[in-house]
Amino acid sequence: MKVTKSTKLFSRARKVIPGGVNSPVRALKAVGARPIFIEKAKGAYIYDADGNRYIDYCLSWGPMILGHARKEVLDEVKKVMAKGTSFGIPTELETRLAEMIVRAVGSIEKIRLVSSGTEAVMTAIRLARAYTGREKIIKFIGCYHGHVDYLLVQAGSGPMTLGAPSSPGVPKDFTKHTILLPFNNIEAAKNAFRKYAGRIAAVIVESVAGNMGVVPPKKGFLQGLRRLCSSNKSVLIFDEVITGFRLGYGSTQELFNVNADLTCLGKIIGGGFPIGACGGKAEIMNSLAPDGKVYQAGTLSGNPVCVAAGITTLKILKTKRPYSALDKYTKNLCEQISETLGRKGVEHCINQVGSMFTVFFNPGPVSDYASAVKSDTGMYAKYFRGMLKRGVYVPPSQFEACFVSTAHTQRDFALTLSAIERSF
């Protein structure tokens, strides 16, 4: 497998782009590899600049649930682009996408479209603080909510700690109101509400964690957070940028029988184009300008091209309802991966929810960040490089999610298992 052009393109990029990439994980440093540069994609496959084809389980970090370059999505995008690509003025398309989301997610009564998941989270936190008149936020260790200053924090040594900045350039004052707790630990959350009684504006959580690898919520965890927020008049925020429309048509809130006050969406609702959204109860959302005093704005918010791609994607998902089949195929693939690794004597466990899964090189179980980081990252790097060499692209980090699309076939799964067999 030649990667000559990718190597040259990386050298060229490093001269003008910090690290040669526009998002750090793409540098492949965590897995001891060099970036591959992608030229095109179709269905379940990506093709690099050297013409190598890879079965793609990253899927642009989740949004390509229908596979790459889905014809119906591209056709609609082309029609909209012919009319203009950005206006900065309202379009009917924005309302149509908003209506589809409101109908699909029971807890969302109104929604504001933005251009990224990070923007959606910023909006949700600002709304929660304004609505409650409080400042403190609870987040969970290992859950990632974009590169917002006050959520870009690391934990101290205790089970409950105020966050310290995890990146230079973030002042300590920006994170002093962020309380970090272990994921899946409802007792820690109860203790935090007791310690900071009447001071917690919101709890933000990934309903299924996807940024420490896939970690599902324990039974009763999300429901416990709902009860704590309701009894303390705090806002419950679900970050569903990854899981929204990925695990079912709508959010995970129906799946787990719990409603958030605010929900952050992204990825799939843009059909592969940059998008984000924050939606929830009308009484909270009405605080946003121009109706209320909470300011939020964006030149490309509700961009017609992104919105058209999202509308078409959601239409297909609503009509086809592929979720049961995706869950079945993904579960079967995970069972066969586990069987293959077991035969090879490789310690591992696999977490799977619907069409999301992570192979942890860790005997498990993995239920939070502390158990996830016990994984053998050196073994994962070997796994990544072996799979890449054999034409399978998995996330270049132990602590990310794999995704399955409707474009993946049984042949793709068989080739994937063969690649694992040969990699070890």
Image (spheres, rainbow, N blue to C red):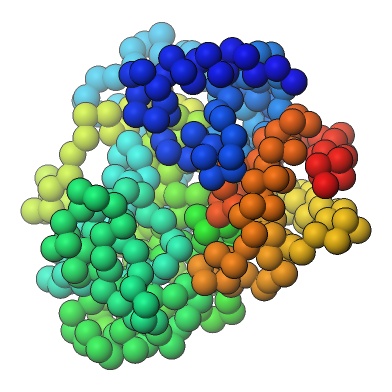
Front residue (pair 184, 346): 346
What residue is drawn where x is 70% and y is 45%?
382
Residue 90 location (% of width, % of height) = 25, 29
What residue is drawn where x is 20% and y is 53%?
170
Residue 334 shows in this picture? yes
Q: Quadrant of residue 308?
A: top left
Residue 290's place in the image compared with 344, above or below, is above
Residue 41's place in the image compared with 227, above or below, is above
Residue 274 location (% of width, % of height) = 40, 32
What residue is drawn where x is 56% and y is 30%?
34
Q: Residue furthest right?
A: 343
Front residue (pair 238, 111): 238
Asked whether, in this view, residue 387 is left or right of residue 263, the answer is: right
Residue 260 location (% of width, % of height) = 40, 67
Q: Quadrant of residue 191?
A: bottom left
Residue 7's place in the image compared with 261, above or below, is above
